Image (cartoon, grey):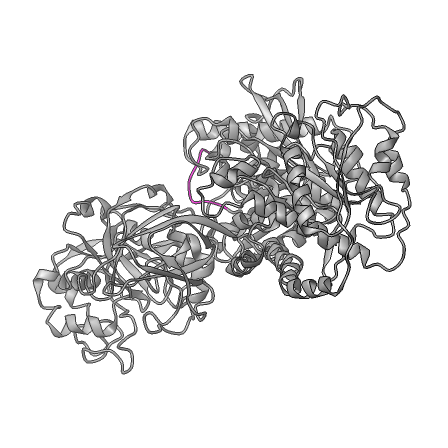
Amino acid sequence: MALLPGFEHDIFISYRQKDNKYDGWVTEFVTNLKKELEATFKDDVSIYFDENPHDGLLETHNVDLSLSKRLNSLIVIPIVSQTYCDPKSFAWQHEFLAFINLIRSDRFGQHVKLTNGNVASRILPVRIHDLEPEDLALFEKETGEVMRSIDFIYRLPGVNRQLRAKDDEQIKVSNQILYRDQINKVARAIKEIVQGIKQVDQPAQVVTSKAASAAAVPTPVTAQPRKAFRVNKPLVIGTSLLVIAAIFAPGLYKKYRVRNEVIPAIQQLINDNFAAPSKAFELALEASEIIPDDSALIRLWPKISRKVKWETNPAGADIYWKDYERPEDPWKKLGTTPMSEVRIPFGVRFKIELPGFETVHVTTGRIGTENKLKLDSIGTIPANMVRIPARTTPMLIVGLEQYQGQPVPEFLADKYEVTNAQYKQFVDAGGYQNPTYWSNKFVKDGKVISREEALKSFIDKTGKPGPAGWEVGSYPNGLENHPVSGISWYEADAYARFAGKQLPTVFHWSVIAETNRTMVIVPKSNYNGQSTVPVGSLEGISSFGIYDLAGNVREWCANPSGTNGLYFSLGGAWNDATYAFNDAYMVQAMDRSVGNGFRCIQLLKEDQSFSETSRPVSMMFRDYTKEKPVDDQTFEFFRRQYAYDPGPINAQVKVMADTGIWHVEQITMDAAYNKERLVIYLFMPRNGKAPVQPVIYYPGSNVIYEQKFTNTYVNRLEFIIRSGRAIAIPVFKGTFERHDELKSDLPDNTVFYKDHVIMWRKDLSRTIDYLETRTDIAANKIGYFGWSWGGYQGGILPAIETRIQCIVLHVGGMVMNPSLPEVDQLNFLPRVKQPVLMLNGKHDLFFPVETAQKPMFNLLGTPAKDKKIIIYDAGHLVPRTELIRETLLWYDKYLGTVN
């Protein structure tokens, strides 16, 4: 008999037969729970459990009417395994869903107010495996709440199995949960729920819902009798229970607050940002103190942090962190080296301290999975220089991308730009008169001149040797800590020789600059348009604590561009636009503009690479204000090269996953070339009304380097699916599982690249060919969404594929790299006539505003009223909420609103 009249049992155990068939895990669980309930309860608790795994009740059969009666229980415990969340299974349909339908219509409802004021669900999941995201989403969709399970999972890397009672004696991992503790948690949770139900002062009235009856189809089958375990104890109710509840209420309230306030706050921060801010990490740390094993929290950790390993030589260094964008915050201690598998947040700066050694600063942009840092004893390296570990050059500088991959050995770099006070030491030491520092060939206006003639130009306002802005051989009062400026490349190189250092090459500068973090560095740097500021006074640091690489003064580099007296100057100055941080500039070596400054590096003794890294380099640049597209007749010749024979589709469709929000189908079909098979992943909304509008997604270039498509690639655009539209993701030639020799998304002058662009067009068009065969797809209302690389391709492919009705380009633009005219974006942009929305960032390192974004927008052939560009104060991602709002408004406007 149950604790309350009108109920058949207190607890109903629901599970898949296969989870008990081979090792009896569920039987063992119920047996141990029975023992724990005997020690916990003073009431008569009835557990219904089908203990016979061979009872003949196959999961494809209908359930007899007696099960509907037994489902009338106070609590259901679903044993949630890898296979439990299966809509085709007996346990899911006839037990789990039927119980939900039943309790939602009885007098207590699904949620119960506990004696301490908190709220609990009458569905108490016991999880024995880590779940796939789609399974978890399905469970939470049906229950309408976050899964708060009690986990019996053996926590070991690479292992996903049930925790057994015997494991308690063998556990070696410090953070492993114990079986006996989890059993105790289940029993205590049951007691709290039962007490909450019993505090309702009106007698229970059970109403059998129509939904539950429908779930239990009245077609009887022969089954062996099922047994019920019963715990019998005298019923004792007194003030002692209230005292116990009061004692435990603070802890329960903390759990309630974390689950109902902190966890949702973390999720909101994730939803609102492409990269979760460190605040989400701080909230997760708070939550982990209260509910470390909570399934919702466990799912959130990878979205707000990553695990890394820290080692220092010597060991014992303390590592602290703070949010990069909040430098005024106090430092928070992460731990002491060595550290293994420690979580770190995104977007932060670190400080590594060890008494007697130089403090090291790094940012998350330079933190890998394994980090080994050499610490220098104080006084063993020059003052205000920092050690830069060896690295392969990323070269994320517009116009120099083709030089990425150059190895750069370990070196020392100035923490600050050379100041007026430091440069005056050179002047006062007779640096301008010492020929040792002036051994380079001088070039002016393309002609070689003598050192004596060159030095005549290197004077201040009063004719004394020195920078252009000085007077009487000295800097203006109060500017001693400002960067020296108004100097030529030759003067910068002479000072470096005087100091026993070198000018950085473009490769060394690229290694330290972190131009991929423009969106956070530039706002904290000096592009004020007024004057320089003291070095190190702003917080726009790059890794290893190097200041002012962005702005303040442009920095001369060692590399010439050819033999015409041009040298590279990088980073931009106080009087430049902010995008100068990402652009390469070639400047006459004799130029003494007010924005010209420098910093130095120092090579280590064993470094023999400088002759290689200081070699002449050339910059790719295209001035799209002067280049002209081909005429219509020539373009028509180009267009014919993209033609294909449609042919039969021969599609095979396989449903890959269903989250309850969407299901994804894998379609394999005949491609338009080489007898290959094209793969398409089609995400169909559950809330869409057929026929649904499809959006074809062309992703970023990272897909070239990925081995296989996963459902996570739709996460960024799930808002489109939730709006009621479908997303089709073709696996373009050379990406994901269709890998070939393609290594980069950058255009070039090869036939290989030309052939790929043509194949990408055919993949796009064959995708539309398939969509046109579906009655549940509105193939006359097709949208295109291009992300980065897809944004660039959005300036080519829609000019050929006119069945696309509407285009959104996220962080797209033009590039400096030339290509064959048949695939040159310049020739296609004027032929794109569809409505186009461009969403861009002011600090985009790949597509700068003036040289990439605006030229693309201006060249589009779309009528002015139907094209729009929005440039945000952002980098190579725009604010997520703005992306969602503007994208959906654009599709609604040009494809029509959806239900």
* Image quarter (top left, top right, bottom left or bottom right) of the C terminus: top right
In the displayed orientation, state which residue is furthest to the front.
Answer: 234
Which of 538 and 373 lies nearest the eye of the viewer?
373
Which of 203 and 826 lies nearest the eye of the viewer?
203
Instruction: Judge whether residue 113 can be spotted in this image.
Output: yes
> Magenta segment: does it hold 37?
no
Please report the bounds of the magenta region as a residue range: 814-820
Q: Quadrant of residue 239?
A: bottom right
Instruction: Judge whether residue 719 can be spotted in this image.
Output: no
> Magenta segment: does it hold 818?
yes
Q: Where in the figure is residue 311, as x and y percent of width and height? A: 32, 51
* Left or right: residue 416 compared with residue 343: left
Which residue: 62% across, 33% down?
25
* Left or right: residue 825 compared with residue 430: right
Determine whether 369 is above or below 222 in the image.
below
Q: Quadrant of residue 200?
A: bottom right
* Left or right: residue 507 compared with residue 378: right
Q: Where in the figure is residue 689, as x and y percent of width and height? A: 80, 39
Secondary structure, magenta segment, majority class: loop
Which residue: 30% across, 73% down?
482
* Image quarter (top left, top right, bottom left or bottom right) of the N terminus: top right
Which of 801 and 348 lies nearest the eye of the viewer?
348
Which residue: 29% across, 82% down?
478
Determine whether 571 is above or below 655 in the image.
below
Q: How many numbered circles are shown?
A: 0
Which of 259 and 385 lies nearest the eye of the viewer?
259
In the displayed orientation, state which residue is furthest to the bottom.
Answer: 477
